Amino acid sequence: MAAKATTKRGLLPGYFENLQQKESKERYLEKLKSIEGQDPYEIPRKEWIDDVDCWPDVTYINVGMYLLFAASPYTQEQLMSYKSLDCYQNFANGWVREVMCKKFGENRLLIAKVNHSQRMSEKPLTPWVVCENSGKVLSAHCDCMAGLGESCSHVASLLWAIEAGCKRRDSLTVTDKKAYWVLPTSVKTVPYARVKDINFSKTPRSTSTVKPSNVTPPSETELTNFLNCIKDCPSKPALLSLIPAHSDFYVPKSVNPELPVVLSSLFDNSLADADYPTLLKKSEEAFELLQVTKKQQELVEEKTREQASSRLWFRMRTGRITASKFKNACHTDPACPSHSLIMSICHPEMARFNTEATKWGCHHEKTARDAYCRYQKEKHINFTVSDSGLFLSTEHPFLGASPDGLVTCECCGTGGCETKVQLQLLCSPVLEYIDFVIWTEKALFIERTFTDKDFCEQNVSKAKEFFLRGILPELIGRWFSRPTPTPQRTMGPGNSVAHEGGEGSSSDRPSIAICYCRGGEHGQMVGCDNDDCPYQWFHLDCLKLKAFPKSKTWYCPECQKRRRGKYSRVQRAD
């Protein structure tokens, strides 16, 4: 395969031929497969579309998932390009201009001009990215020196520009449409300035030579007293982390051996390319090893009482189904689990949101809690409300819940107050009840709720299946966030699919490998509605499905990301 050339002049003709290393050329061609083998730098200018309505639905989660968790094609390690997350400022400063798009089926190719980050007077660079129409970033490239790494600052600046454009586009009415591009004005050149006119944020480094010090080195006693003195500072001095006598205080709480395992640590780089059945098998093995002891439950609750202000709170929630996600986890189809739900559970720090409703709730939370306390103190003996941390279920270690507060009184015992009731009671056996509280500026509503065992038994099994089929494959092998490979029909000896109304025997038609196992037609099977699926039919046992999919249209785990197809085909065999 070779990069397609055109007779018309592209944006950067001849780029591919000038790549020096064979490995770089092979990787470049690999990325072009998702856009039908066309080289973005050779596509004629007239074929590009300058229309934001054609852009993919890229969100800040898609940008973060790519820059942090996409695998490097050279090291197979996650990119972890935290520095590129700061490149939003480059876009805000107007360094990105002329963003254009071209459609390739379900994928979108976007290209732009981006100013150099260090050499302002030079010709701008030309990064490009390929995204699915849903917003997932598949690959990227830039013609800068670091562009082969696929996560340079210019690629990141383009991604943030796309994210901002989509956000602006989706928030407009029809009458606003002509003025949609109310974004930072692009900057073509950055003029030089006299040094005396530049306001530097940092003090320039002194050019004077360092003179030898005449100060006598401190004694062992003086040094010890000094270290003990700075130890009592309000903030932790980084210097003490290097001193053996003080370094224990700098060990992150989440690696405390007394705490339960952080589920994000289950990632196994050797499974980064594993197929779905392999990940399901590994998920079952990992599930059997999960446990939370009573002591660990108490310790986590104690150390996470700051909740959203505690980093440990986020780390312990990672990969666990919490009360706010429990309903959605129980209602999503296990045969086709919600991708956005999986992402929000496996990467909670990236899925934070802030709306006017949540701002209002946070602003009035203390007022509501005080009103609840005043009302209950008149009805109960020695009534108190205290902060609550995260409760991890000892019986179901994949579940967790954070009540809004812990409630105690002499007449009713220990309870909690919250708006998501049953999972709180399930994860917090110390709580005998939960007060369901609704507060407005006009009224206060309180309803006491007790454990509903039937409700818990029915829904915990649903949440467990979602955890095994959706959450663990993402935690262990990044199944849902890894790039989607280009489908290729796999032919297998002796395996054929019977077609209704077809002529001739199955031996007259080319054989197609059925399912991941290549085991042929047997048992209960379900057909993928993507006509380009490399397998077409799957055994329910291989997919660990207990029943046929609920929806009329179904896609296999690899094709679910492509979202194409017409009608489901379900085959039942003895």
Image (spheres, grey):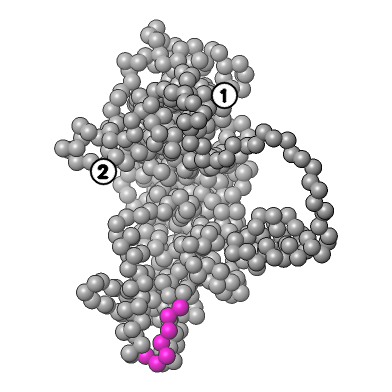
Q: Amino acid at mark 2?
A: Ser
For image coordinates 63% across by 43% down, the residue present is 270
Label 2 packing within 10 angstroms: few (<14), some (14-19), many (20+): few
Q: Does residue 274 appear to the left or right of 549 in the view shown?
A: right
Provide residue 187's location: percent of width, then percent of height. Answer: 38, 26
Q: Which residues are magenta?
A: 380-386
- Residue, disc 1: 145
Q: Is residue 516 above or below residue 320?
A: above
Q: Nearer the viewer, residue 264 or 219?
A: 219
Q: Looking at this view, is 360 or 559 the one in front?
A: 360
In what element is the residue under mark 1? loop
Let me know if residue 500 appears in the view. Answer: no
Q: Which residue is mark 2?
A: 171
Q: Which residue is situated farthest in the front direction here?
A: 214
User: SS class of the residue under badge 2?
Assistant: loop
The one nearer the camera, 560 or 444, is 444
Task: Confirm whether the magenta stretch covers residue 381.
Answer: yes
Quarter of image, res 375: bottom left
Q: Residue at x 31, y 15 (%)?
A: 46
Q: Left or right: where does residue 39 sit relative to residue 217? A: left
* Residue 183 versus residue 453 in the image, above or below: above
In-front residue for pair 232/110: 232
- Residue at 43% in and 72% down: 403
Q: Is residue 272 visible?
A: yes
